Amino acid sequence: MNVTAPTRPVQAAAINFPTSGRGVVINLGSAVALAPGRFNVPYMATKGYMLSLSEALQEELAPAGVRVQAVQPGITRTDIWKRSGTGIEQLPAHM
């Protein structure tokens, strides 16, 4: 779901935006895409996919006037860490 759901609207934009010569795609990823091996592998891989997809689309669509941005928010201190089995106290302080 972390791959299929965001890919579908991006595909539609990649087809339609270039015909108008403008458009912006903003993909939401995660900073875990930049830290391979530190977190849950499937989740981390899907965030890496979003970053790669965004970078590739930017290269492909820029000549048509379309901009693609990947937002990589950092770690937030929420209860999700308890539910994931990785306590937030295990994370490096700089994160």
Image (cartoon, grey):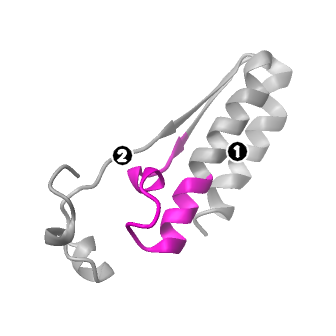
How far from the left and from the top, in percent, is residue 64? 80, 18
What residue appears at the point 39 percent right and 69 percent down from the top-left corner?
39
Query: Toward the viewer: 94 or 16?
Result: 94
Q: Which residue is mark 1?
A: 10
Label for residue 81? none
Can residue 21 be seen? no
On the rendered structure, is 68 left or right of 77? right
How far from the left and from the top, in percent, is residue 93? 14, 55
Can residue 69 be seen? yes
Tell me if residue 19 comes above or below residue 71 in the rendering. Answer: above
Quarter of the image holding residue 63? top right
Mark 1, Cα crowd under 10 Å, few <14 / some 14-19 / many 20+, is some
How far from the left and from the top, in percent, is residue 77? 18, 60
What residue appears at the point 36 percent right and 46 percent down from the top-left corner?
73
Task: Check disc 2 and report its element: helix, strand or loop.
Answer: loop
Q: Are marks 2 and 1 in contact (CB under 8 Å)?
A: no
What residue appears at the point 61 percent right and 69 percent down from the top-left corner?
1
Q: Which residue is mark 2?
A: 73
Q: Which residues are magenta?
A: 27-49
What residue appears at the point 31 percent right and 48 percent down from the top-left corner?
74
On the rendered structure, is 44 left or right of 68? left
How far from the left and from the top, in percent, is residue 25? 62, 34
On the rendered structure, is 65 left or right of 2? right
Query: Toward the viewer: 90 or 77?
Result: 90
Task: Check disc 1 and report its element: helix, strand or loop.
Answer: helix
On the rendered structure, is 30 left or right of 9? left
